[in-house]
Image (cartoon, helix red, strand yellow):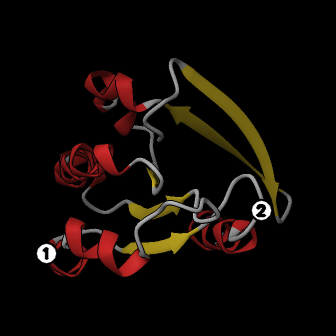
């Protein structure tokens, strides 16, 4: 889920001969996110590392997602994107603002954090590896 997208985008991936459909839902559509939770088996929550103004609202949205009853046992990947941008906070600073250690310790679901750059492809293999590990059994 990202914060600048409007609408939903569907993408099909083939992971070890298994078709996985990824639904991207923009952050501005947060009020309707719960309508998609029932059929969800994993969540990739994307944080725009270059948009410091949105960090606090991203954290609030994340806490809302993590507290949703249908997602209590759903694997969650928190993806800090745009790590290639010149004016970003360090990953340590962002995780501190999010209080990631506290969130991970208190959340009922398994949470993984990764950093990436959609533009450069940095972290893409790790994201695909995570997605494969939670979908292909």
Left or right, 119 with reference to 92: right
Between circles 1 and 2, the one closer to the viewer is 2
Left or right, 132 with reference to 34: right
- Residue placed furthest toward the right: 17
Mark sitting earlier along the chain (1/2): 1
For the C terminus, the quadrant is bottom right
Question: Residue at the location (24% across, 55% down)?
Answer: 66
Left or right, 119 with reference to 75: right
Q: CA distance from mark 1 to mark 2?
A: 31 Å
**Element carrying mark 2:** loop
- List x then y, in percent, for residue 83: 58, 65
Question: Residue at the location (61% across, 72% down)?
Answer: 130
Location of residue 101 by image quarter: bottom left
Q: Residues within 10 Å of mark 2 (few under 14, many from 20)?
A: few
**Element carrying mark 1:** helix
Of residues 86 and 115, which is closer to you in this image? 86
- List x then y, in percent, for residue 72: 24, 58
Q: Which residue is mark 1?
A: 106
């Amino acid at each position: 889920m990202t914060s600048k997208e409007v609408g939903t985008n569907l993408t099909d991936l083939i992971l070890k001969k298994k078709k996985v459909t990824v639904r991207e839902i923009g952050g501005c559509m947060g009020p309707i996110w719960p309508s998609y939770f029932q059929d969800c088996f994993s969540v990739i929550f994307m944080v725009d590392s270059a948009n410091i103004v949105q960090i606090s609202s991203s954290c609030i949205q994340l806490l809302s997602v993590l507290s949703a009853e249908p997602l209590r046992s759903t694997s969650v990947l928190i993806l800090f994107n745009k790590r290639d941008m010149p004016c970003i906070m360090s990953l340590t600073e962002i995780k501190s603002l999010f209080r990631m250690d506290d969130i991970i310790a208190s959340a009922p679901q398994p949470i993984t954090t990764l950093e990436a750059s959609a533009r450069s492809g940095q972290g893409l293999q790790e994201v695909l590896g995570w997605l494969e590990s939670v979908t292909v059994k």
